[in-house]
Amino acid sequence: MTTQTQTGPDPKTALSSRGGGPRADRSFQVLTLAAGLLVLAVLALILITTTREAWPAFSEMGLRFITENRWDPPSEIFGGLAFIYGTAIVSLIALIFAVPVSIGIALFLTELAPRRLRGPAVTVIDLLAAVPSVVFGLWGVLVVAPKLVPVYRWFHDVFGGIPLIGRVFGDPVGSGRSFMTAGLILAIMIIPIITSIAREVFDTVPRADKDAALALGATRWEMITGAVFPHSFGGLVGAVILGLGRAMGETIAVALVIGSSTQITANIFASGNAMPSVIVSQIGESNGTFTAALVGLGVVLFIMTVLINTAAQAIVRRAEIRMKGSAA
Amino acid sequence: GCGGGDDDSDTGTGGTDASAGASEYANLSGDLKASGASFPDAYYQEVITEFKGVAPNLTVNYNAVGSGQGKKDFGANLNDFAGSDSTVKDGDGPTAGSFLYVPTVAAPITVSFNISGVDKLQLSPDTLAKIFQTDIKTWNDAAIAADNPGVTLPATNITVVHRAEGSGTTNNFTKYLVAAAPDTWKLKSGDVVDWPASTQGAEKNSGVAQLIKQTDGGIGYVDFSDARASGLKFAAIKNKDGQFVEASIEGTTAALQGAEIAEDLTFNPLNAAGATTYPITAPTYILVRTTYTDAAKKDAVKGFVRYILTEGQTLAPEVDFAPLPDELKTKALAQLDKIQ
Amino acid sequence: MTRPNPKVDTVTDRPSVSINAPTSGWGAVSVDSPQAAGAPVMDLRDVSVFYGNYEAVRGTSMPIRQNQITAMIGPSGCGKSTILRSLNRMNDLVPGARVAGKITYHGQDLYAKDVDPIQVRRRIGMVFQKPNPFPKSIFDNVAYGLKINGIKGNLHDQVEEALTGAALWDEVKDKLKTSGLALSGGQQQRLCIARTIAVRPDVILMDEPCSALDPIATGKIEDLMHELAKTYTIVIVTHNMQQAARVSHYTSFFTAEVDEKQVRHGRLVEFSETGKLFTNPTDKRTEDYITGRFG
Amino acid sequence: MTRPNPKVDTVTDRPSVSINAPTSGWGAVSVDSPQAAGAPVMDLRDVSVFYGNYEAVRGTSMPIRQNQITAMIGPSGCGKSTILRSLNRMNDLVPGARVAGKITYHGQDLYAKDVDPIQVRRRIGMVFQKPNPFPKSIFDNVAYGLKINGIKGNLHDQVEEALTGAALWDEVKDKLKTSGLALSGGQQQRLCIARTIAVRPDVILMDEPCSALDPIATGKIEDLMHELAKTYTIVIVTHNMQQAARVSHYTSFFTAEVDEKQVRHGRLVEFSETGKLFTNPTDKRTEDYITGRFG
Amino acid sequence: MADPVTRPPASDAPNLTRGALSLRRRIANRLALVLITLALVVAVVPLGLVVWSVLSRGGSVISWEFLTADIPNSFRRAGGGVGPAVIGTLIITGMAALMAIPLGVLGAIYLNEYGKQKPLARMIRMMADIMTGVPSIVMGLFIYSTWVLLFESRSGFAGALALACLMLPVIIRSTEEMLRLVPDELRQASLALGARKWRTTVTVVLPAAISGITSGVLLAIARAAGETAPIVFVVGITSATNWNLFEGENTALPAQIFRNASQVFEPAQERAWGSALTLIVIVLVFTIVARIIANRFAIKER
Ligand SMILES: Nc1ncnc2c1ncn2[C@@H]1O[C@H](COP(=O)(O)OP(=O)(O)OP(=O)(O)O)[C@@H](O)[C@H]1O
Ligand SMILES: Nc1ncnc2c1ncn2[C@@H]1O[C@H](COP(=O)(O)OP(=O)(O)OP(=O)(O)O)[C@@H](O)[C@H]1O
Ligand SMILES: [Mg+2]
Ligand SMILES: [Mg+2]
Ligand SMILES: O=P([O-])([O-])[O-]
């Protein structure tokens, strides 16, 4: 060590660890781990407390809790099928409207929009995302629902006569508070959610893939179907599922515009009810098994969300394996 | 604490006439949390506003969450007193013996409607029951026409609006139907009933009023005060004596005359006899605890309820409620002394 | 490994344009007249490419000769890819990109008003730096171009023909249904070549097609290029001088030069027959580059 | 640009270890005994590096000599970076990575139980392929290592000294507060070097430090390396043979070989004095590589 | 030509004009592009209508008085304001953020810096995703049946707890995402200088990701500020400002909107619109600040 004047201590001793360094590292890791574990704890607590609260209803009703269509608190009969149906139909309507529109917007933003339009368009979507759902509910109940009645009537008059399909366009309810209104409000609510994820998904399609399609003489649309979509399938399913989750869980906006009827009907212009809105509107005035049943609806909703997510993940994984091959 | 209460009362209540009572309320201080029935909400809020004038140090919050929630909060100790239109049953929350009923006011429950082109509607109990059971589906149904000779009724669909949540108003309304149309009405009575599928729910009395107002062909039951304040039209109901009577304070007062008062001060003025009686008249109560651990709280509750039963009664007609008959008022005041 | 001489057997019956002729306007660029060459399929005259206001490449003139492999070499950022992408109007896709000067294809102005870039790209195919098969099956990868272009005939036969042409058929014929992404890098790149030749282009542009591959896969692609040059005209960008020397008939050397305003522009320094460029470059900068004195 | 000869003036007073001695155990690898060299600061004996079960590099033995620049060259994936990163235990950070064989540093086993990798890294610094200044000010970038290592003394002076040592001081002295990311690529890389030398390491490892830079910036870094070699021992991985030839005193050539089970392993083929390796390689594979016959 | 058989037939007289593209392909392309553009219009129209409704009806209501005055205790009564709800929204959401941000960031550090792909980390990640999907009403039920019933009181803090539970997984995942964007080279550079991992994380990784984290956090706060269901459940109601989160009931703008929206009385509906406008502005401020931070201080791409 002649020229190494800077090297302080003799390296032989210097290489072993000094002071509390490794312990500080350890404590920090434990701290972060604890924060991470909190998620597990809270989630477990949610499941345990809600299931425990709901237990009287579950044990009383058994499977009929989700298969029976009769919600009769005075008789202590709690069959929530109508609300499950309501949640499903309303979410379905929301997806039917929101998915194509969101994908369209996302494609517009990633593939079509001239750069100077991109910024404003993104801002518009962000604005839409910034509107809290309760505001959509307010707008829905005070402005939209009454205005939609004549529109529904027109649809009923025009399509109501068609066999089978006509039943979907049944007699509209006089207040306009219906599955359809709730579905539309939800669609507007989830468009920014699906759009922003779809946009990210499309953005990750490698430039090279798009170039490859275009270099083969594809039109823009052919490029989108040939190069963009195959790459985005998994991501898009994820986006749709996230939107679906939000739609299924949305409480206030739906509660305000769905009309609170306990019925299963193909007529999308009829009023109905969905799980979260039943909970929020009835739990205050409930007690005993009734309360348990309402909490039980929450548990069922939660489980449904998880199941749908898991199923979607499985679908995505399989599709991705097929598309990308086992290697990638 | 409420230091200097006496001094405050002299200056603070200079404008009020009943100086003896005023000084009594002026001593009260703190916060009172209350929740419950939406039916008397308009009245209670009126009283609270006036009460602030005589008891400036006491803040009363009444939260019109509905009778059922009020009772539950009461049972869970989440409020200091509860408002309820219905009596307490097992599982409602409060345990028997831990509370007292104090009747405060009574009021009609209107059957409000929104039919374009129709201003006046008469309904007999049977027709009413059929409508709310959706046995009758359109406004030009023969049964309705029979109750309304000379009125042209449209073919509009009937939209029945009821309370989405458990409610004392529902309880009283369905109790009336059980009493007045025993052969027709199948849905029994209760805070919640098993409404037919195509009926619609809305929250609180004013939510029902809103939904009726928005819906051509809508009909529902709404407390008198909210119905009037929102400008709804309401039907004349055929009473026990066979007369069609419109909801009014007078009709209610008449109903109260005939009502029998139970030991615990609950009473039932529904479907009462008398030619001028409005038959769907409902009482409303405040639930107070028999014992309050906090003395200041006890005094506050007692003071506020006493105010309702005394000066407060004169406010009732202003917001379309009927004051209690004197006999009942005396008994209610006596009830307050049982609070420890 | 032997450097092939420019193929004399591919000379066509077209009149050989003397690229040294004064009318060519290639100015300062030293252009060598090869003893034998294909007719120019494409021709660049004083081509500059801009990205917005930035002139990435300045005044490039050179011919692309039929059934010959033309290589473009030069240090990073000198505009090789930019020029290559302007040959099939891929630069149209970059917002703000603009081409000045004239690029002709069979005498037709590539940037004329009524020219549809989609038709251009169908005829002038492209193979990219990183193998980029679509996330579809091998078959669908090759069939894609056929389908969108509505090319008639037996799909399967055409796919087989293209895969055979890309020297990949034997390796994949038993697994046409598996994903193109499941292949090795070299196979993927040959799949991309198959995809390109399936639509029967006229010219194939390749932008560093081997830079992501190992030496063995690179060797295979290079062999394939010789094969393809019998049928197609090829332009290849490469960083690897050895590769340019091995495969190409003509080589153009680009470099980036700083102008008075301290802005870097790509410039074509020298275009000539490959053998000549590597053994006897006219320009000092070319010599410095190929002898490894910079880069 | 001229290739410097191995610097004779840096020979230390330590006994020169004859790396041709039979005890060295470098087996098949042909090792040349240079006429003059620094004492080995580090020594690799039969070092293999595993990623999980995969043996990325197999049996590597070579010395790292004091105040000399040792270059590692070879085709992509042959394990140059892997070996380099095992020299300051950066591979510890890769889950599953494991080193077999022995690496000594001043005679001490680098992988002994009681050795703290933090101390190792503080003494054996590293400069990476892509310039990676922290998103902090220039000053803070250099001061960072001083602060975390609790090095005493005037912070500003030490930062200035490091920046001067990295030949960057004059260019940045007026903007020490601006972000390190606002510098050009070459300046960024010199900032990274300043950051490394600020903590006064003993050895500096560099993994393709110029591959992201233009020729001018590369030139500056190469000059800087010569300067640094006066004080530090340097190991550099490079793809660019010319660079290895230009800057290093010793060069080791790696390649990837396929074993019986068709698994590729990196192998050290030849280690010798740079001049010898490039002009007169012992191994056929080295010759093929440096003459551009593959890679 | 050397090989006339395989030579593409069109090469001699290639038709490069637009007409060469088949009609079907041209129409399909045009139609698709038009529909795609239309999608944006479809989204803009309802947004415009909502904004118009809220601005026109809420704008006439809003005043300093409206933003600060107590809430009238009767829905029918005109005048007054929603001051307590504005304060409630700010302090409840603020408290929730105070709880969720440190926990969320620490959790994300665990996931990205330590756990990585370990089974436990994957499990936490998956559970965080599931927790993100927990309907807000269920979160309300959860807090109600644990906190509110346990302490026998609705309070602002109960609301803050519910909002914190809703924010936590969102913050964890968005922060993890941001940490993932921090180039590994930075960590390695720090480690190569002899820094310990925790120091590297705190002094290099977090600062490098801070803008992304901040913007993710602000978006989570914005979303929480608009949550209604749990607030209605566990916060209770008050007509006077309650600065104490731990004692006494509270209120927030979403709850005011919800309650007033289902009222028949004009003054109540006006308060709903006014509250809606106020809430949107609050949420928008958070969103815009988030965007500015994200754009202005984004990790510089290199
Ligand atoms: N889309 C673009 N927008 C703006 N400038 C660009 C764009 N693409 C390339 N450039 C610039 O144009 C110049 C030439 O780039 P080009 O990619 O053509 O170089 P290259 O020779 O292919 O380099 P490489 O060997 O690294 O691929 C560079 O200065 C580059 O920064
Ligand atoms: N983290 C890792 N996990 C598993 N395998 C790895 C890892 N890093 C490198 N390898 C493998 O080890 C081998 C040697 O890689 P290494 O990065 O050391 O090569 P290299 O010579 O530096 O290549 P290059 O010149 O491309 O940088 C390669 O086969 C590589 O795939
Ligand atoms: Mg390029
Ligand atoms: Mg490497
Ligand atoms: O008064 P209620 O709200 O219970 O009907």
Image: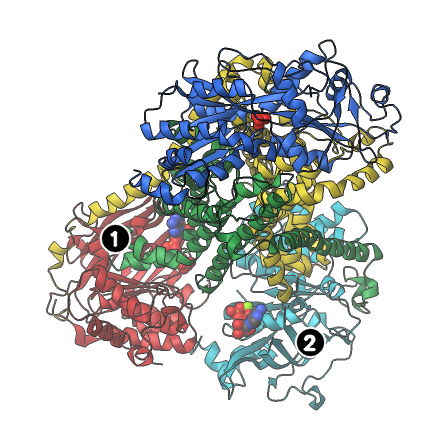
Chain colours: A yellow, B blue, C cyan, D red, E green
> Which residue corresponds to mark 1?
E196
Q: Determine whether A13 is above or below A62 in the image.
A: below
Question: What is the three-letter code of the residue carrying label 1?
Answer: Arg
In this view, the residue in front, A87 or C139, is: A87
Which quadrant of the figure has residue B56? top left
Within 10 Å of disc 2 (Cα), the crowding (few <14, some 14-19, many 20+) is: many
Relative height, residue C284 to residue D106 (above, below): below
Q: Which residue is mark 2?
A: C37
Q: Please rate how many residues cluster around mark 1, counting C-alpha atoms within 10 Å: few if below 14, some from 14 to 19, many from 20.
A: many
Residue sitting at x 50%, y 16%: B88
The reply, left or right, for residue B139 in relation to residue E106 is right
Residue C244 in view (yes/no): no
Image quarter in which the N terminus of chain A is found: bottom left
Quarter of image, res E117: top left
Which residue type carries mark 2? Ala
Position in image of residue C127 (x %, y %): 62, 61
State how far apart marks 1 and 2 are (Cα). Answer: 65 Å
Q: Quadrant of ligand 4?
A: bottom left
Question: Which mark is drawn over residue E283?
Answer: none
With E300 as the anchor, is C195 left or right in this view?
right
**Residue C136 screen position, x and y as percent:** 64, 46
- Compared across the picture, whether E189 is left or right of C79 comes to left
